[in-house]
Image (tube, grey):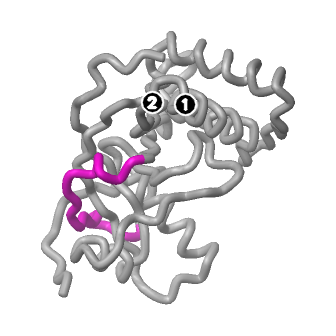
Amino acid sequence: MIFNDYHRTVVGYHGTKLSTARKIINREKSFNPSENSDDWLGHGVYFWEYAPQQAHWWAKRQSAKSNWDEPIAILGSMIRLGFCFDLMDPYNVDEIKQYRETAEATGQRVEDNAFHRKYLDCAVFQYAFAAIEAEQDHKVDSARAVYVPAKPDRVWARSWISKNAHIQICVRNQACILGTWLHYPTQLSGDADDDSSKSKTTEIPIE
């Protein structure tokens, strides 16, 4: 496992309810880590790296799914990656594949991925985190990877550029979240597929 040079900071964006966002800003509560069985980078707090529109798209979809009765909010956070399992490093991709083999060899129950449900990914990452922390006696602070849609929207034929590809960060150690602020797109009806949806930070009362 390579942890070199990951003590750097990035900006991540997180979508949630406005009331929850205000409590986090006012330090009345922490972020709620996701602990679903299909979290593709394992359990933790998920952020979109330098991508507020992706956070807005997710919050908009979650609001409709869960019938939120209040506005959505986008939080921006300065995140120190710390000891980061970065899947943009090919060495670490090989490592996670080896952890899957080890998990299966030791009888770990590993469920296959479904189309949108990444059960296998989650189980392997959770196994890897536990193994790394036992072997190296320190916590894995974060995981980071590129999300490529199953059907990427290429800008033109055979291009590497995909409109909805993005980087996600799973923060496992919230001490790595150095500061958080409210951030809103200028067009709340926009989403990740709306070219007209620009973004900026606006001052919103947090009292």
Q: Is residue 55 above or below residue 124?
A: below
Residue 45 on the magenta span: no
Question: In the image shown, does 25 or 16 lie closer to the viewer?
Answer: 25
Magenta range: 173-189
* Quadrant for the C terminus in the image: bottom left
State if disc 2 and disc 1 touch (CB < 8 Å): yes
Residue 174 on the magenta span: yes
Q: Is residue 5 above or below residue 77?
A: above
Q: In the figure, residue 118 lies in which quadrant?
A: top right
Can see residue 84?
yes
Q: Which residue is mark 1?
A: 134
**Residue located at (43% from left, 41% from top):** 169
Residue 21, percent from left and from top: 33, 73
Circle 2: residue type: Asp
**Residue located at (77% from left, 43% from top):** 115
> What is the crowding at mark 1: few (fewer than 14 residues within 10 Å), some, or many (at least 20)?
few
Residue 145, percent from left and from top: 48, 31
Give the numbered dot on residue 68: none
**Residue located at (17% from left, 62% from top):** 201
Circle 1: residue type: Ala
Taking 125 as reference, is 20 left or right?
A: left
Determine whether the residue tagged by mark 1 lies in a helix, strand or loop: helix
Taking 62 as reference, is 182 left or right?
A: left
**Residue located at (31% from left, 36% from top):** 81
Real-space CA distance between mark 1 and mark 2, rounded to the nearest whole angstrom: 5 Å
Can see residue 153?
no
Give the numbered dot on residue 137: 2
